[in-house]
Image (spheres, helix red, strand yellow):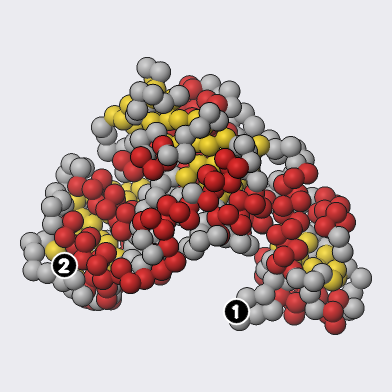
Amino acid sequence: MKVENLYDILLKCDHKVSTDTRKIIKGSIFFALKGENFDGNNFAITALKNGASYSIVDNKDISKSDDRIILVKDVLETLQSLSKYNRTKSSCYVIGLTGSNGKTTTKELIHQVLKIKYKTICTKGNYNNHIGVPLSLLQIKPSTDYAIIEMGANNFGEIKFLTELVQPDIGYITNFGLAHLEGFKNLKGVIRGKTELYHWLIKNNKQILINNDDDEQRNFVNDKAILFGKDKNSHYQFEQIKSNRVSLKINDLIIETQLYGSYNFSNVCAAITLGLENKIELRKISKSLKNYSSENNRSQIISKNNSEIIMDAYNANPTSVKCALESLSNLTNSKLAIIGDMYELGKEENIEHQKIVKFAKGLNIDKIIFIGSRFKKCEINFKNFHFFNNKRELDKSDLKLNEKNILIKGSRFMRMETILNEL
């Protein structure tokens, strides 16, 4: 079936799409995707029974069993092609977003601002890969004004591919950090991979949003670039105000947020800049950002037993861990950091864990607990440092975890949020 005909079906189904028969949206199109341990084709009929209107399959035999089953050459490629076609048929303004750290938080902040005035959609959760991005693009309806699409990558060429699907009107890279080194090898590789977005934007005469305080990003300044930052030559100049929460000043107005960590300063600035660029009043932006609170273990603030817990356990890499530790160090009252192993670092794994331990020695933190076999290899005898192979060992120890400010951070595999029950 041609993509044009599938698009008509998408409109008929009101852009409702499903990929999991356990979570079928009534009246949706079910895409029978394949995984390492399953073949979605085998669930095409189940999807229809559970409420889907159509099933897209690439198994000829299964396609004969029901008139509502549509046969295509490749389900994943069809999903991607349809998402690109849907984006091109829409007149909505699309913002493409990538970076090593802070992508999801920045996406949520931009959405928080733009929805003040416009009908806005954004990537759900961290649906930012070759499947998630198409699913996000299929959310765009003819009535959608703005779409914020997050793109992730762990190897070269992936951002380029996703950007071709997204075709953003403007793009922004949050930062370049030591993440996904298995694929990118080093920081130069990260920069090369992430800036595939900027190269596409320049080639297609689109706008670039640039953090003017980032030396690497300034290399991409052109006449269509929008610059923000502390730098006085920025189109939008911000002043960072010292506080336990991210606070800043622009145009004599102080904007306060509930966000923890100085590393979130540029994320907030990016959202404000896009709001102002799109004719949203600064005072309305300020009010909206003040009401925003982070969720899903991303710089999430949790109050428990007279302690304030900074739950930043969704993921971790050397750059984000250093930033989180440094921000904790600057807080007042007693401080505890519980840091879990970092994954996807390739050959640099041992060196990067050692660097974190060495970095932590110079910080003003009362107690630091390192958890995981990677950090355990780096164990040193240093005041207030504690090393455990896993969370069970910590649980069995007699350590008191009752400091006033507690940071919890680690890679997703470590599931550091489960420590919350021990506090």
Q: Is residue 389 above or below residue 10?
A: below
Q: Residue at x 75, y 80 (%)?
A: 42
Identified by mark 1, the residue type is Glu
Give how far apart the Cα atoms at labels 1 and 2 are: 38 Å
Identified by mark 2, the residue type is His
Helix, strand or loop status at disc 1: loop
Earlier along the polypeptide chain: callout 1 or callout 2? Answer: 1
| Residue 85 screen position, x and y as percent | 76, 51
| Residue 258 screen position, x and y as percent | 38, 38
Q: Is residue 383 above or below residue 172?
A: below
Helix, strand or loop status at disc 2: strand
| Residue 343 screen position, x and y as percent | 37, 68
Q: Residue at x 36, y 71 (%)?
A: 346
Question: On the rendered image, what quadrant is the C terminus found in?
Answer: bottom left
Q: Residue at x 64, y 49 (%)?
A: 166
**What residue does disc 2 label?**
386
